[in-house]
Amino acid sequence: MTTEIDRIIASEFASLKAIRHDLHRHPELFFKEHRTAGIAAKELKALGAKVKEGVGVTGVLGYLPASDAAGNTKPAVALRADMDALPIEEETGKPYASSVKGQMHACGHDGHTTILIGAARVLSKIHRPRPVLFVFQPAEECGGGGDRMCRDGAMGGEATGGLGNPVGCIYGLHGWPTVDLGSVASKPGPILAATDEFVVRIHGTQSHGAYPHQGRDPILTSSYIIAQIQSIASRNVSPLDSVVVTVGAIHAGTASNIIPKSVEFIGTIRTLRRETRALAKRMFYSIVEGVAASMQCRAEISWEDGYPMTDNEPALTRGFFETADAALGADRVVRLSEASMGGEDFAYYGAFVPSCFYQLGLKPAHMDRYPTLHQPDFDFNDDAIPVGVKMMALLATRD
């Protein structure tokens, strides 16, 4: 079967590359992926797949039944790709660079969408031992499109608002600039972090900069808080565990000689264990409110529970490694020893079915560094498309 899949991919590669360049030229932000979704739906319909649009706002589901009656008694295997772009001005200089000012595919979702279209083309032409559900998902970067897809019943089949049989397991991939082209990487258990967000407003008393004793300084208070919340990692969590506390922006003041009435700062906390996630939130509130009170200011905290930890199911991940070893060679399959502190809303699917997420190598062998994710010079490597399509097709046909 591998030879047949390789032959189909080779015949489709030029067309898939053209699709990827077209998607790259027309990026769309979260929950606005109407054109991209339309392309995915059109491709699926051309293959004879059953299609449902508007799932999770702008998401698309495609369904190919198993090749025989026995296979159609089995749960479906789902393959997922995210479709949204980022609000970044592109600096690649490529002939197919973004035509939309201030928007670009800086995270490779154009490549992911193309790979899933390619997998659908391959799977429509080969024996399928069980049904396959293609999940084209919106709003990975912002908005939790994976959560919306799940809440719209995408994993439950026809009975819950999806298509066909209920899903038994799901695979997802992400192009990875630090992994060599032609290789894949993954690990069982936690592979990506939970991503919680916070907004803190410190309310003090405005005063002249020359007479600080007449006010209550929210800038000084905020500086103490920002320093102290780093003790969540250094003094509250085991050195062998992982937590990242980052303040990404601070907004305050109007003049050099005025102590302002309030300060706002925003940031994120990343964790890899549910217990650590709960501890970090509890300590964050305690420190922020306690330090503010000690400085005679008042803290107002807005907390947003972000994406959960992406947790690869061990048995499914073992199957992924078996497939990758056989298809690519063990020297091109990386067993990761550590998780990434980046986040992914692929995590939501894992609450419903066993899931496995893996990294697809993008870095050519001759390059020491490949432009990384969310940078204005990033561009998905077209040469990674065949490996991504092959892995998705093989994973979908595992018995």
Image (spheres, rainbow, N blue to C red):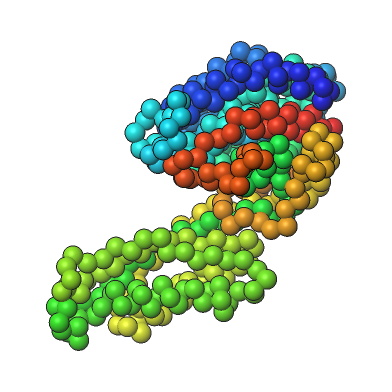
Q: Residue at x 56, y 53 (%)?
A: 342
User: Which sits in the foreground, 25 or 59?
Assistant: 25
Confirm whether residue 161 shows in the render: no
Q: Residue at x 17, y 78 (%)?
A: 209
User: Which sits in the foreground, 251 or 111?
Assistant: 111
Q: Determine the image quadrant of residue 137.
A: top right
Residue 378 percent coordinates (x, y): 50, 40
Residue 126 percent coordinates (x, y): 78, 18
Up the image or down, 123 lies above or below 297; here it is above
Q: How many numbered marks, from 0 up? A: 0
Q: Determine the image quadrant of residue 76.
A: top right
Quadrant of the snapshot with the N terminus: top right
User: Which sits in the foreground, 45 or 186?
Assistant: 186
Locate residue 295 relative to residue 283 in the image: left or right.
Answer: left
Residue 213 percent coordinates (x, y): 20, 86
| Residue occupying the far front of the picture | 366
Q: Residue at x 68, y 71 (%)?
A: 240
Locate residue 290 relative to residue 170 in the image: left or right.
Answer: left
Confirm whether residue 197 shows in the render: yes
Quadrant of the snapshot with the C terminus: top right
